[in-house]
Image (cartoon, grey):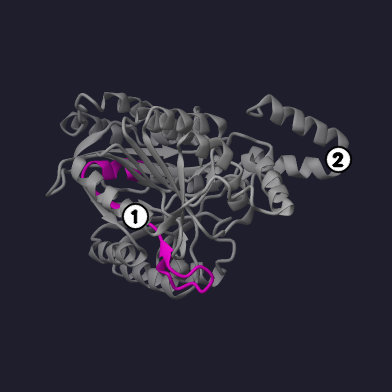
Amino acid sequence: MTVRTSQGSIAWIVSLLTFPYVAVPLYWVFGRTKYHGYIDARRTENKDMQPIIDRVVPELPNFVVHLKEGHMNFRVMEELAAMPFTRYNDADLLVDGKQTFDAIFEAIESAQDYVLVQFFIIKDDELGREFQAALVKKARLGVRVHLLYDEIGCIRLPGSYLRELTDAGVHVSPFNTTKGIRNRFQLNFRNHRKVVIVDGRAAFTGGLNVGDEYMGRGKEFGPWRDTYICVRGPCVQAVQFAFIEDWYWATHEVPDVNWSPKRSHSGDKNVLVIPSGPADDLETCGLFFLHAIHSAKHRVWIASPYFVPDPKVVAALQIAALRGVDVRILLPERADHVLVWLSSFSYYSETRPYGVRLFRYQPGFLHEKVMLVDDDVSAVGTANLDNRSFRLNFEITLLVVDEEFGARVKTMLEQDFDNARLVEQEELDAQSVWFKFGVGVARLMAPIQ
């Protein structure tokens, strides 16, 4: 009754009737399209937070920005985010693992009151232990530290790692993906957000998790290409609100945090925080990509490790290219998830002939999630250009409307394109029959990848 397409409904009905012993367990895991109970928790949380909201709301007019002509169509993003654009923000672009974690560790070291941390993957390796030590140090100094992790992403993280954190006073919780009787088997939903917030004054997000490979130390992939963003200013409270919602779902607690927005010491960037996930009434993440692509006048560049878009996004890319927009998609050459990598080949024939240019990044593995629309609209976050991010994962994206920041993103992506090769139309045609068969099978599984 709730499957997104008639084709999907027919496929499940046939499978459930023909192979019930196989299909029923698969349906428990993969069949649902909505994550239940999160909205109810949000409403309860809002009641618990009402005194805080009553204090913050009167301050918002001092920070809400009125976008200039030419950007008014991005107002619809505020409806998707259920948050306003704010001004008086500063934003730093962190273009690799060293820059990112140097900045994160420096911010954690400077914390005076609290640190909020959320990651999809945490590993017990060199970077993971350095990360653990930074949190333990602050907790023992009396700084409140909250760590939220996805139990599917961290399935290999040993319990001893988490016990060392809790013994030091860190408040640790899994996201509890299977919480609630209707979600008991829903392993297909993930909390893919990566967020660090310090004292309500600085916030970080982007593609990097906590693990040595994200620092380029992994032997399998070599250099790791990824991007983070650090923001300061009133938008930090919006990032914080997304974290608090997740924490409340997991623990039914609302931490005492700083809800007083402050303008940054430098910069006047317009920033919108867009949390998205399977509990939303609308498909927020997919609609965000769709509207951004349709809004492009002369450029839309997207970097994503995975390229499994739905038909609406494919059509938007086609129309943008036919309008003369410079549409480029930057993808990795190498695969970390074979099915998703194979699926991307099936979209060659739907994009390349219409002017969409696809590039494969050569040195190491490309994992950044970045979009540039024209010259001054940039997005950095955790969402990939795939169905999982559109519908199954909890994600967060920061949209920055600013020429100077857009110029930095443009320079960064130009360097990435210089390290990539242009995909030729004939590449899939030249592959073996078995490779094409694998691509076709992978495409059939695109909705759950």
Residue found at x 25% / y 39%: 375
**Residue that numbered label 1 is attached to:** 228
Real-space Cα distance between discs 2 and 1? Answer: 45 Å
Q: Residue 158, relative to residue 380: is it above or below?
A: below
Q: Which residue appears farthest toward the right when viewing the image?
A: 18
Residue stretch in magenta: 214-241
User: As drawn, is 267 to the left or to the right of 294?
Assistant: left
Q: Residue 207's x, y, as percent? A: 42, 54
Q: Residue 108's x, y, as percent? A: 29, 63
Nearest the viewer among 17 and 175 is 17
Examine the rendering and report whether any part of residue 20 can be seen.
yes
Amino acid carrying label 2: it is: Phe
Nearest the viewer among 284 and 191 is 284
**Residue that numbered label 2 is attached to:** 19
Residue neighbourhood size for the residue with mark 2, other residues' Cα within 10 Å, grouped as few (<14), some (14–19), many (≥20): few
Say if the magenta span includes residue 234.
Answer: yes
Q: Earlier in the sequence, mark 2 or mark 1?
A: 2
Secondary element under disc 1, as helix, strand or loop, is strand
Place residue 432 in its image quadrant.
Answer: bottom right
Amino acid carrying label 1: it is: Tyr
Q: Residue 329, relative to residue 141: is it above or below?
A: above
Residue neighbourhood size for the residue with mark 1, other residues' Cα within 10 Å, grouped as few (<14), some (14–19), many (≥20): many
Q: Residue 9's x, y, as percent? A: 72, 28
